[in-house]
Image (spheres, rainbow, N blue to C red):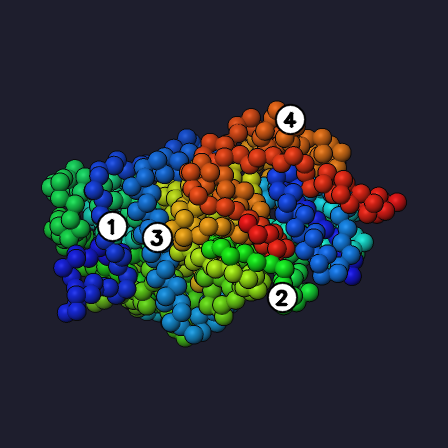
Amino acid sequence: MTAELHEELTDPHGEHLDHGAASSPPLKSRISEPQPRGAKIRGNRPVDQSEAANRFMAATEHEAMHDARLWDLRQKRDKEMHGIEEWEELRNLASSIKEHTLSKLDYYLELFEKNATANGIKVHWAKDGAEHNAIVLEILRSRGVERLIKSKSMLTEECGFREFMAHNNVEVIETDLGERIQQLDDEAPSHVVVPAVHKLRTDVASVFAKTIGSDPDNADAHYLTECQREATRPLILSAQAGMTGGNFVVAETGTFVVCTNEGNADLSANTPPLHIASIGIEKLIPGLNELPVFIRLLSRSALGSPITQYTSHFRGPREGGEMHVVLVDNGRSERLGMEKFWPGLKCIRCGACMNTCPVFRRSGGLSYGATYAGPIGLIIDPTFNVHKYRNLPYSSTMNGSCTNVCPVKINIHEQIADWRKTLAGEGEISPVKKVMMKAAGEVLASPVVYRASLPLGRSALRHLPHFMLYNKLNTWGRKRDIPETPKQTFNEWYRKNRKSQSEGEKS
Amino acid sequence: MKVGLFVPCYVDMFHPETGIATLELLERFGLSVEYPVDQTCCGQPMTNTGCEREAAKTEELFVRNFGKYDYIVTPSGSCTNQVRNNMTAIEQTDAVKHVRSRTYELVEFLHDVLKVDAFPWAEFPHRVALHNNCNTLRNLRIASMSERREEPFSKPKALLGMVKGIEFADLTRPDECCGFGGTFSVFEEGVSAKMGQDKVTDQLKSGAEYVTSSDSSCMMHQEGCARRMGANLKYIHIAQILNGARA
């Protein structure tokens, strides 16, 4: 995503220039508040998203900026949506195309392999992240590559690719500005489209000061961008290999499409003679006729801009060069077989669900402690590790806004509910929740026990009934007043005032 | 038409006036309304937490209480959504199917079933911000949703528009969840409270004197936040306004 624009960038009428509608109004931080870090990862123990979210919100400047920035993207998305009469039809189409392709995935994958091979692309198959990393390393080693430049890819995050390459002495340089910031800060991306959106510009200034020697007191976005450009261009020019992801893989043509706003995928792919694209197997679409449906939806949903600045089609190696595509499964086939959760594979990684999610906007993407944050993360992450990510489906109010903005109509909030059921069924639920719900279930099943449990004004206990407070942590009252208990319940009022009716009914 | 009144647990406990207003309002339209006194809850807390098995007995009790009515009406869209769309812990007998398909949230019952076109007794000369519960909005479709490209409509606004003197205050994020989320409000207290505070701030900025909704649960949370923040806002259930509450 582009940096903020300067105030002086105005049109002749003094109106602030809206750069491709994709930029956002400048948000300036006056104070320097340390950037809150993400969830604490303790091996395989369940990630505590709430704990990290609370730290994020305690950094009020960061939380306010994060919420405002992403809400701004959501509003721009709405504006674009209203500009397209057939918007809902497009969503239906996109969803159907994905469902069709996923239902015949083996066919389309093989068709792609055949056509891509004919185009001169070498196609590799990786069943998981480890296999992917090994395949790429083998390609790089056999060609003596020491430096790889790459554009943004969530798949390589899944695979732990950078860390693996670091251990194998291959230098990896991210070319997406936000991703480069995150790499230099040794932090994962916090959002699938805007990976450093949780950082204030002062945070970026401090990262760059430490890593590329910029002025720590200069947090001007243009200055910082220029510093990064100066530092990174020589590395890009001297890299021996480039890596990209792929937004859409076109089976009938054996080609693939990468969408970026910075042109960095083109730099990564075209500067060195060797181009490797790592792509998840769910990215297939049947043909070029289907592509525009997604192109029209992707950037509008993501950033509220009509199209990404670059939509690059890769058709084969250039003369004297090499092009490889690594098709990665990494749990996708298994997910495809999950009755309730396979629709998550329709995802085109636009991040609209994150932008609209009120929990995500207040928590920051790193609070989820997983590759995929926000609503889509809640339904994908448990497929990677059900125990570690068992709390994530609870980091949602299930308000359903995510489902509404999803350009491929994934029933996200329904899947969140389904995950809760699945997790509870498998015993992957926190003991507090389990005990509390068992008690609630017993109390609410019995009118007599239920009536006896109510606190009421006559009692000294002016708080919520016991079954709602079973965990002994009256979390309700920390930041909220507890509702006053009236003199009588409705039930008591009814018995008193409409007694004859209720008795008549009972007889 | 025999109507069974379901008064959700938190309304029964904390907002009996909402239950009374609902009952009186329905009676104004000449309906025979009964309140089965052995009712408790719709099972939503357990279902939403994923503990479907734990919800089964409560769901059975609900069907036992309400099986005999033509319509079951409740001043809560969230509970209606539970009954209509999520009451799946028990065997889907004819009685269960009947109850599930005949349960209505008050506003949709007035708007869609009774097709009410006037509340001559109602007058509320105040500036009011409307809050739609997310289940009521996005699952029951009580109003158009800002995320979707659809014709604007709002059943609660259509009804409130018939109340003399009422003035609407516009929120900047009308569809944004307030953070109640049922058990979310207890398990994820920090984010829940922050969302509630942000909602209250938006309501304050709108210049509203009152906030109204067809769901007491969201308002209980918002009111809790507002009081702690010292915000001068009053919360009133839509049933009360439509039943002629003056303030």
Q: SS class of the residue under badge 1?
A: loop
**B230 and A240: which is toward the camera:** B230
Residue located beneath label 3 in the image: A70
Dot 4 falls on which chain? A
Residue under label 2: B118
The one of A416 and A442 positioned closer to us in this rendering: A442
Quadrant where the N terminus of chain A lies? Answer: bottom left
The quadrant of the picture occupied by the C terminus of chain A is top right
**Of circles 3 and 2, which is in front?**
2
- Between circles 4 and 1, the one closer to the viewer is 4
Amino acid type assigned to the residue bearing label 2 in the image: Ala
Residue A445 appears in the rendering? no
Q: Observer-nearest residue: A303 or B44? A: B44
**Residue of label 4:** A459
Instruction: Say what amino acid the circle numbered 3 marks.
Output: Leu
Residue B233 is situated, as x and y percent measured from the top left of the image, at 46, 45
Same chain assignment for discs 2 and 4: no
The reply to whether residue A267 is in sight is: yes
Q: CA distance from mark 2 to mark 4?
A: 42 Å
Confirm whether circles 4 and 3 share one chain: yes
Q: Which residue is mark 1?
A: A27
